[in-house]
Amino acid sequence: MTPDHLIVAPILLPLVAGALLLVVERFRPRWQAPVGAGATVALAAIALALAARAAGGEIGVYLVGNWPPPFGIALALDRLAALMVVLTAGVALAALLYALDRWAVSGPHFHAFFQFQLAGLNGAFLTADLFNLFVFFEVLLIASYALLLHAADGRALRAGFHYVVVNLAGSSLFLIAAGLMYGVCGTLSMADLAVRIAAAPTADAGLLRAAGLMLLVVFAVKAALLPLGFWLPDTYGAAPAPVAALFALMTKVGVYAIVRTTTLLFGPDAGPAATLGGTELFVLGVATTALGGLGALAAPRLKGVVAFLVVASAGTLVAAVASGAPQALAGALYYLVHSTLAAAFLFLLVDAIARQRGSAGDGLRSGSPVVQPIALGLAFLVAAIAIAGLPPLSGFIGKLGILGGTVDVPLAPWLWSALLASGLLATIALARAGSRIFWRTHRQAEGPGVATGAVRVGAREALAIGVLGGALVTLTVLAGPAQRYTVATAAQLAEPRGYVESLRGALPVTRRAAAATAGAVEP
Amino acid sequence: MTAWLFASGIGVLTATGVWLLLRARTFDVALGLTLLSYAVNLFVFAMGRIAVASPPIIRPGVPASLAHYADPLPQALALTAIVIGFAMTALVLVLALRAHLAAGADLCDAPAGDARPPTDASAVTRSGHDR
């Protein structure tokens, strides 16, 4: 059997492309955009091929360096990982397309860091090793620091500094937790950890629970859960639009890690660590949802409104995942895809709107009218309906899935109240923002850029916004197939034995075995 | 005794690191992160059990258990963490320096600003009061 090299491709391709882009930037700067875009398109194709393979329910395992399972690092492709990789590639494609017109040329190394960020994201989704997860977190964080500070001024630098320090402190905690896990279990492979945690003696229960809770705290920092998420609105507000769109994925990395660890390591059968942190995560998720709604109402700028809506959606996701109901998990996965696309859509749109309003920017006060009121207004309407979770778009379907999936959960009324209230607050905030920006305008346009029409949305920018809007509509129209996939994903996650066994049973390709099969084929 | 010394060393490093991390100047914060990463590296190293004068390479005739050998994996993990921590420290210092030069003060807390598209760089950012 030949190893399935396609599984490692979503990590290798952006890494190689990023390194290549550094050289290209130095010697052939004009080729950067084609190379970066080509690599991202190829990544999307690979992601779709992987998803087609994972959809059948088979778990693909790739042994990096061909070491036998307990010793080396393994990558695992299940339905959840495939879903995340596809989502990453899709959002990346739109963000890069949007960046090509203006942002990519406003500072150095944009394309290279963009690819490194993709490599880190894909690695975090595909890896089946706890320490390797830490390494890929660092890879994507380093790239995100650089992208955040792309074309930044002094104030953005300060927001960036906060972001870096918070995440570095989180990384330290991650290392302590991973070290503790290794000290107790003697392994860092997630499959082996799942087995050893379940069989751990009661004497180690305290240490295990401490390590597990520390891991969850780290992931909660990434997911911007309530007491740990105050870095997010400032950071996203300071990020350039295509980077903010890509960052819509970053909170989802935290959510993904919470899903992976709570189903695999701290599931109901995990002995001393069974359903570890479930109640705490649920309560914090509900509180984060409510806070996100309130923050959206209070934010003075449109970008801040969107950032708080990202916080709210992350809280909803964590609460739904922590409720432990498989149907809620399926609904949450659908909502995860939707909320990522919707947030990216809005971040790009806000940038286009802010540019056309002269000195008012994305501030929520009356300013000069936008140059293209009908196109931008309609796009804003669609985006607002989607992210607030109103029918008929996919946000409504996602929220319905979460509400319906948590019927049997005792604490569910709290989640329902928070979810519906934050939806109402989001609707009010977005309606107010829309009426201030598009209707309560001064008579004439101000500023030289507006007069000459230099700030109109470029063709590639319009295409990027259209792609994300189209993706949201597609997700709504194809909600049936999409939900079948997420239900199958939740079912696969609820049975971690398959994941554990395919990882522990994976065989390295030895030269002798390869020679034997070759001999068998050609006698 | 070795374990006690090791543990209190990690404790002192963590405590000073956290204290510095909570201060309001970027230089102190960078220093705190460095101390914290030292503590973490030592902690990860200690998770392979502290063994004095025992090699990590298996010799013939000696049973392969942690009683006779040092665990090589935490050493590799600590090495990885050191490399990453070093790069991160450099990045934090550069950031702190640039923020210091841009703002003229070494303070962590200031209102966060908003990144603007390149053509709009001259526009003045105002607070969001309605007219």
Image (tube, helix red, strand yellow):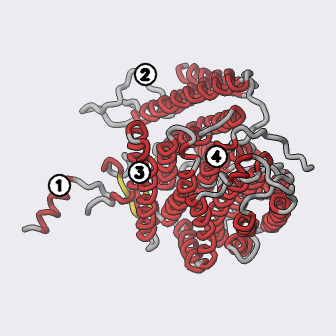
Q: Are marks 1 and 4 in contact (CB under 8 Å)?
A: no
Q: Which residue is mark 4?
A: A240
Residue A504, placed above or below residue A409: above
Q: Which residue is mark 2?
A: B52
Name the amino acid type tagged 1: Arg
Quarter holding residue A516: bottom left
Q: Which residue is mark 3?
A: A35
Q: Nearer the viewer, residue A334 or A16?
A: A16
Please rate how many residues cluster around mark 4, counting C-alpha atoms within 10 Å: few if below 14, some from 14 to 19, many from 20: many
Same chain shared by disc 1 and disc 4: yes
- Residue at horizontal 42%, vertical 43%? A21
Name the amino acid type tagged 4: Pro
Q: Which residue is mark 1?
A: A512
Quarter holding residue A381: bottom right
Residue A257, placed above or below residue A228: below
Q: Position of residue B83 (x, y in %)?
A: 47, 30
Q: Nearer the viewer, residue A207 or A162?
A: A162
Q: Position of residue A72 (x, y in %)?
A: 37, 46
Q: Earlier in the sequence, mark 3 or mark 4?
A: 3
Please rate how many residues cluster around mark 1, counting C-alpha atoms within 10 Å: few if below 14, some from 14 to 19, many from 20: few
Question: Is any part of residue A183 visible from this angle?
Answer: yes
Instruction: Please indicate whether residue A143 sits to the left or right of residue A397 in the image.
Output: left
- Residue at horizontal 54%, vertical 46%? A104
Q: Which chain letter goes with mark 1? A: A
Q: Quadrant of the N terminus of chain B?
A: top right
Cα–Cα gap, marks 4 and 2: 52 Å
In this rendering, the label closer to the viewer, 1 or 4: 4
Name the amino acid type tagged 3: Val
Q: Are marks 1 and 3 in contact (CB under 8 Å)?
A: no
Residue A488, placed above or below residue A181: below
- Residue at horizontal 64%, vertical 50%? A241
Instruction: Please indicate whether residue B95 sits to the left or right of residue A450 in the image.
Output: left
